[in-house]
Image (spheres, rainbow, N blue to C red):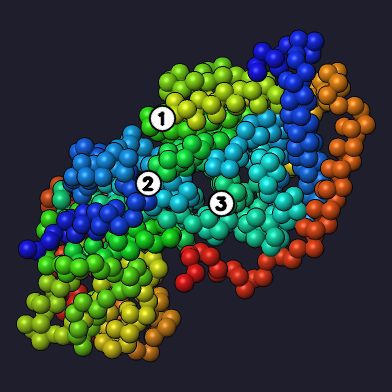
Amino acid sequence: MPTTYLEAIREGLWEEMERDPNVFVLGEDVGVYGGAFKVTDGFIQHFGARRVVDTPISESGIVGAAIGAGLMGLRPVAEMQFADFISCGFDQIVNFAAKCRYRWNAPVPIVVRAPSGGGIHGGPFHSQNPEMWFVRTPGLKVVCPATAYDAKGLIKSAVRDNDPVIFFEHKGLYRRIKEDLPAGEYTVPIGKAKVVREGRDLTIVTYGAMLWTALDAADELAREGASIEVVDLRTLLPLDRETVLASVKKTSKVLLLHEDTRTGGIAGELAVSITESIFEYLDAPIVRVTAPDTPVPFSPTLEEAFLPNTAKVIEKARWLWRY
Amino acid sequence: MSALLTAGPVRQTRENDQKLAALAARCHYYMALMREAEDRIERKLYRQGKVVGGVYVGRGQEAIPVGSALHALPDDVLFPSHRDMAVLFIRGVPLGRVFAQYMGRVDGLTRGRDGNMHMGDIHLRVVSIISALAATVPVAAGAALALKYQGKDGVAFCYFGDGATSRGDWHEGVNLATVQKLPVVFICNNNQYAYSTPLELQMACANVADRGPAYNMPAEIVDGNDPLAVYDATGRGVAHARAGLGPYLVECKTFRMTGHSAHDAAHYVPPELFEQWEKRDPIQLLEARMLENGWAGREALDATHARIRQEVDEAVAWAEQSPYPDPATLLDDVYEQP
């Protein structure tokens, strides 16, 4: 029976809690209610209130408490109800958690889960993609799975990692995608991108929900004869530049796609990495498809205009293919 | 013990008197050590250019970290703030490593990655502060949650000043700790100034302890210049926390006998306040009491100072021999090395 993206995260967390008694979850409404999106539904009944901690509305308190418990040898998984609220815990993440190992050799093995992304009519405070705030912070790891398989494998790796991991779960994928997962135990390594679709003519590099947009666009353009390679970054920090560079070396054209807003998005960093490393391989300008530099608007017409979609990707990819 | 401490020497039994004399001697040593170490840092090494960056000392506040941290047991975890250097010594951090830290040397607790009191040692269960004050409050709550989770009867000792209690992190951390009944003793050094901002511009209540009842947290006010009073109050807080009754707040009234940092002459502090508090110097008060009660003679106290000066001389010499970190290590330890 196929497993949804949301169920995959739940399974991954459940298995890690079964495996290691030091793993516990904390956050707003994660216990009796099972989490705003029901990721931890049933956890408190099985693992008890000691390991499933309902907290006050206190993002800084939640992340801070996770850090303290992590310093004492536990493996806390903190839930932000929406990624948009992670800014309330920003200082704890970027100044406390991220810098402990570098400053005084103290590992902070925590996971902060953050449901992010638009397309659900959530408006400016329930739709954002704040991953780049953290990609700018050495010491953190930033993970953005796009598939159910990766979501399960990466949440398990995140729990086992000895550094702080910010785990962005795309809300739009929670119940929209599903696949059959292997019966046995597996993990997916943090920091490794994946070539999801092989092609010769151009590469689309993306992550999160936009993977599915990229694959739809590649299918459409295949009917016109274009052979498109799609790379899923999966982790934004540490960034797997090697996989991206190898693909672009092969196709010589690259379109960088993300749902995050344009300025300071990962596309800019990748574009520079490509030009400074393999400029001579490029046969065309590097192309970006991103959300514009605005807050995420609420009304359906505005949000549709804001979000990248298959049509927008096809238009740019076709131009690039024919360049 | 509280009544005994405040009663005159005549009323004390011999056994209690011996215990008090021993406690006073330990307090005296650590307070004088902190004073000497910070004087050396601020008045010598900093002025000689050997300490780079800022220096923030706890002169006049030594009774607070000493009177409280002497209660710490091995399972306890301590979160000293920037004017609590004695916590490090009580916990067993070698003196030389503290000087090396201030001088940016590789043998500092942060190997030159951070300066001044931004240091900790996870094996000694001392957690490093960050610059944003009160950030350690929710972290201490989480450490206490871990102690409870692990079935240990350890307590988190969380230190901060009056200014830190204005921050959201303070309130989030205290709220979480009280709701979850976590074993934390909150120790406030109310030194009446946060950088240049006096207490009345920091908060509308008269005491930090007044915040306790809003969280259903017991809070008491003690003379922060009396280490035995701080010891006594912290003891009550630790007993409360260890008994599983939740957090406890000890507000220690004191005065910051310096500027905010070595570069701040504190012109905004009325000089009469310094004069008034100079007479309440915690080390001098303790020595007078030790002499008066016959807990020590002048020679013994002088010998302690002499021994400390020698320890500091040796530690500074050791730290000055410590190399600066190799620039080749710049990229190390951002993440766990594979």
B170 in relation to A290, above or below: above
SS at badge 3: helix
Measure how far apart labels 1 and 2 are at the Cα level: 27 Å
Residue A15 found in image quarter: bottom left
Position of the C terminus of chain A by quadrant: bottom left
Position of the N terminus of chain A by quadrant: bottom left
Residue B111 image label: none
State the residue in front, A279 or B136: B136
B267 in relation to A111, above or below: above
Measure how far apart labels 3 and 2 are at the Cα level: 28 Å
Image point 76% across, 63% down: which residue? B322
Instruction: Identify residue type, mark 3.
Output: Ile
A133 to the left or right of A284: right
Residue A87 image label: 2
Residue found at the far front of this picture: B15
Residue B181 image label: 1
